[in-house]
Image: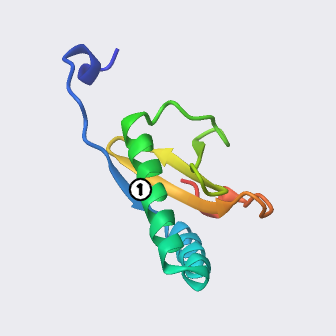
Amino acid sequence: MGWNQKYNIKIVMKIKLHPKAEEDLNKALSYYTNIDINLERKFINYLDKTFSKILDFPNLYQYETKTSQKVLMDKFPYIVIYEQYEDIIMILAIFHTSRKPINLQDRAS
């Protein structure tokens, strides 16, 4: 049992996006903006909810690799892949489920 669990201390974690995940996000936003600005807003809203779920329950989701986990977004066909560090959740990828699975080697620690 870690000291934070023993003393019931919650560590505040932050979300950071890997530069490649930022590229993924920009592509998705561009796609949805071209369809409808309201769709882009909905996408951002559901992505924010997904990030909140990861922050609230970082250990809940299935492992994609030895060190990275994945979560499916609600309402949109996207997967968010992340790694946990002491006080950071690093988002490695945000990708459409119809795309060929990405190679995380250049994104992972």
Occupied quadrant, residue 57: top left
Residue named by callout 1: 48
User: Residue at the spot x=42%, y=50% of the render?
Assistant: 49
Mark 1 Cα shell of 10 Å, populated few (<14), some (14-19), many (≥20):
few
Q: Is residue 11 above or below residue 40?
A: above
* Residue at x 48%, y 57% (from the top left corner): 47
Going 59% across and 61% down the picture, which residue do you hit? 94
Near-viewer residue (101 or 45): 45
Taking depth in this image into account, of 11 and 29 the one nearest to the observer is: 29
Residue 99 is situated, as x and y percent measured from the top left of the image, at 77, 64
Name above or below for residue 2 compared with residue 46.
Answer: above
18 lies left or right of 76: left
Pick the front one: 82 or 33: 33
- Residue 72: give x, y in percent of width and height: 61, 47
Amino acid type, callout 1 = Asp
Q: Residue at x 62, y 79 (%)?
A: 31
Pick whichever, 74 or 99, lies toward us. 74
Query: Would residue 77 appear left or right of 94 to someone viewing this image?
Result: right
Where is residue 95 drawn, in percent x and y? 65, 62
SS at mark 1 in the image: helix
